[in-house]
Amino acid sequence: MKNAFGAPQSLLVLGGTSEIGLATARRLIARRTRTVWLAGRPSPALTAAAESLRVLGADVRTVPFDALDTESHEERLGKIFTEGDIDMVLLAFGVLGDQARDESDPVAAVRVAQTNYTGAVSAGLVCAGALQAQGHGSLVVLSSVAGERARRADFIYGSSKAGLDAFAQGLGDALYGTGVHVMVVRPGFVRSKMTAGRAEAPLATTPEAVASAIELGLRRRSETVWVPGALRMVMTAVRHTPRALFRLLPV
């Protein structure tokens, strides 16, 4: 349930070391979110992430989670919900991959697809079922503008995000009227450790800006959030550019 500040009282971050996930957690803790679960591979980074939130006053717990180990999702994520209601789930895991390498290494390409799409479908459905059983809550899915149209430069990553985006929209429709709110977030280029060393795209943003947009979207009960908002019109134009012309663009 939401507190007097309009923020969820409990939060589950799938992808517990995600910079966007942690920025969102910090923002919500400042609004009096009190319980945070960080789900991710056990590592010093996950331990440090949990401690960084504890010092802000939250009760932070970690749980082992691997997007690729889909057979474990129902048991490990389901157990979290037996500890008490979860007001918000943020699906924040994903990998960019290396387009040049992955084109010549199908196994690596499949790993990107399985992490970003298959793993997200599995975890998303487990959490959606648990939220529906408790009768309330929000599922926030980090998609990407890369999923709006496949680009030569990153079509493996983009196609996995396109699948995730379509899945999340369909899931939102399926859960409409159940008390569960699904929100799809489509950031552009985010300045983070994951994108370090890559050429920055126009309208680049930050994890903190995405977190702010997520919070605002939650308050508005938005179904789709673009970060920054100007990307909505840009991607509308990109989506409708003729293919013969699009393939000539330096994107």
Image (cartoon, rainbow, N blue to C red):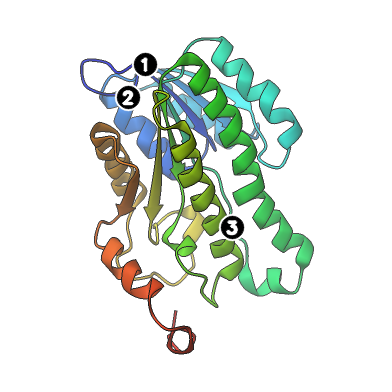
Q: Which residue is mark 1?
A: 34
Q: Which mark is residue 160?
A: 3
Contact, mark 1 vs mark 3 (Cβ under 8 Å): no
Q: Measure the alpha-carbon separation of dots 3 and 2.
A: 31 Å
Inspect the image, locate mark 3, and give the three-letter code of the amino acid beneath it.
Ser
Q: Which of the 4 image quarters holds residue 138?
A: top left
> Circle 3 — which element?
helix
**Label 2 sits on residue:** 29
- How far separated are the C-alphas under marks 1 and 2? 6 Å
Q: Residues within 10 Å of mark 3 (few under 14, many from 20)?
A: many
**Residue 147, position as x, y percentages in the image:** 49, 61
Front in this rendered view, residue 216 or 29: 216
Tag 2, which secondary structure?
helix
Report the amino acid beneath label 2.
Answer: Ile
Q: Earlier in the sequence, mark 1 or mark 2?
A: 2
Give the amino acid at mark 1: Arg
**Front residue of this view, candidates 58 and 65:** 65
| Quadrant of the snapshot with the N terminus | top left
Dot 3 or dot 2: first in sequence order is: 2
- Residue 104, position in %: x, y? 75, 74
Number of callouts? 3
